Image (spheres, coloured by chain):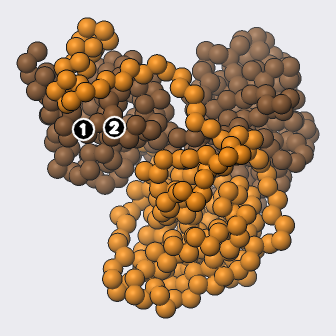
Chain colours: A brown, B orange
Amino acid sequence: MILVIAEQHDNTLNRATWETIAAAQQFGGQEITVAVLGASVTAVAAELATAAVAEVLTVENPALGVYTADGFVQALRGLIEQVKPEYVLLPHTYQTRDFAPQLAASLRRPLLTDCTAVKSVDGRTAFVRLMFHGKLAADVVPQGDPPCIVTFQIGAYRVDQAQKGSAPIACVDVGLDAAAIRQKPEAPFRGAKQAVDLSQAERIVSVGRGIKSQDNVALAEKLAQALDAEVAASRPICDAGWLPMERQVGSSGQTVAPKLYLALGISGAIQHLVGMKGSRTIVAINKDAEAPIFEVADYGVVGDIFEIVPALISELAQG
Amino acid sequence: MKIAVCIKQVPTREWQPRINDAGTWIRDQDASYETNEPDAYALEEGLRLKERAGGEVVVCCAGPARVSQVLREALARGADRAIHVEDDRLGAADAFMVSDALAAAMRDEHFDLVLTGLQSDDQGFAQTGVILADRLGMTHATIIMEVQVADGALRVKRELEGGWFQWVGLPLPAVLTIQSGINTLRYATLKGIMAAKKKDVRKVAAPATLEASQRILKLYVPQKQKRTEMITGGAADVAKTLVRKLREDARVL
């Protein structure tokens, strides 16, 4: 049996849960139970019940109303003890990364994180993970007894791959010691006020480490002007203060899907890719032929951005 | 405050991976190595906390002999002393093995605070810090962008998806996994490099039994999912071709 742990906030289901359901359905031949934790999750449970799964379980407790690692680990230990799954699947969200390793450590069970696929290798179920800056893939198997906990990379499966159906909803009682919860979370808040909404831009010129210095950002800005595009950047550029945080594209910044995304000197680390791989046309210019950005590019140039970009500006001026 | 910073040595960003003959790991001997970037930010944060609150920063690493490189660099940046859990099994180890090795060496030190990067650039599990917290009997918080210490407790800023953040209160002792960009890294000075030579590096053997939680059946170059059209030639030719294709084929200009 596969247990999928749904993620919800303020009674809204995180879409990534549907990706995890799709992954579970592609295991083939296993019964799927989806569980959702919270204080009162009726609406979310009803939405989950439209999935083609065997059942939906609600784990409700006032102490689960706000997410804490200790609360969730306690509740999930209790749930896993009751339903005894072979696999526990979750989306690889920031929240999952906060509690899944604690759950695995306390159960002393394997945790395979940020997986992109499930496959059968010599009759065993193996999971694919990317390693070494996304340059290599590994087929990995857990060691030891079940359950094995697996988290899936955001976007590895698509929401529309999840099959629909009708599942019964039941509630599960797990004992929870609220006093043992060590974390005291405050309300989440937005960072910088978003003056630039990159998600509305039709064309984006984005810079990564390959831009080398703050002064060179002006070159990218000139290209953006020539293309009537917005300027964006990968995280390290914003961390360095060369462009404001609001121009960051990636898992901790904005997710964009413009008609044209031009990646200059961006290697294509997964944290950046998840923010832009939905773009219609992706052009990558990078001097490293092995850079993972070329995995998602429609057009690629292995070359020096400081030669190519001025040439592009020139060419566009002629058109 | 007694602060531990756990760091990892990983192949450099620029290094082109070569796979060993068995197809199960990289060819270690061909790699050049550096400190895992998020761990460098964790070290910087530890040094800043020590500068504000006093105490000591102990840099810890579980790995083969070669990791002494990154321990020396950390000492040169200002860590007071180091703990090296040395074992060849730790080169390709999973998060459970590394955490067990570190915990065995760190337990008796009774650290107030343990910092480490949120994940490593080689295996990228994003697990070691949190598992270590469990092994040391400490609480934890992950992907931290700011650390405040007051009245023997912590208030830390977690990074969430899409530009959101959240402050969380935690008791000490605790483990924090640190996000890149939390601060600005300092460079080791010549004075620091000279001083590092005299600082204590305690070598500890790893536990005899290190249980692996997972096994790599095969390591390989991933198959391309997308058909990428590579444009070659001199800069002027590339520009001409690219602009034409974007205009006429992709129709995005």
Q: Which residue is mark 2?
A: A286
User: Exactly how many numbered labels are in the figure?
Assistant: 2
Regarding residue B198, the answer to whether it shows in the image is yes
Q: Callout 1: few (<14), some (14-19), or many (20+) C-alpha neighbours within 10 Å?
A: many
- In what quadrant of the picture does the N terminus of chain A appear? top right
Question: A47 or A112: nearer the eye?
Answer: A112
Residue B4: x %, y % from top left:
58, 75
Chain of the residue under the numbered disc 1 shown in the image: A
Picture quarter containing residue B62? bottom right
Residue A184: x %, y % from top left:
61, 57
Q: Residue furthest bottom?
A: B198
Q: Residue furthest front?
A: B21
Question: B78 or A21: nearer the eye?
Answer: B78
| Residue shown at 63% from the left, 32% from the top | A116
Residue B202: x %, y % from top left:
63, 84
Q: Amino acid at mark 1?
A: Ile
Q: Which residue is mark 1?
A: A305
Picture quarter containing residue A146? top right
Chain of the residue under the numbered disc 2 shown in the image: A
| Residue shown at 20% from the left, 44% from the top | A217
| Residue shown at 40% from the left, 82% from the top | B193
Residue B160 as seen in the image, left or right of residue A33: left
Q: Residue furthest left?
A: A318
Q: Amino acid at mark 2?
A: Asn
Measured along the vertical axis of the image, is residue B198 above or below residue A102?
below
Residue A23: x %, y % from top left:
70, 25
Regarding residue A57, the answer to whether it shows in the image is no
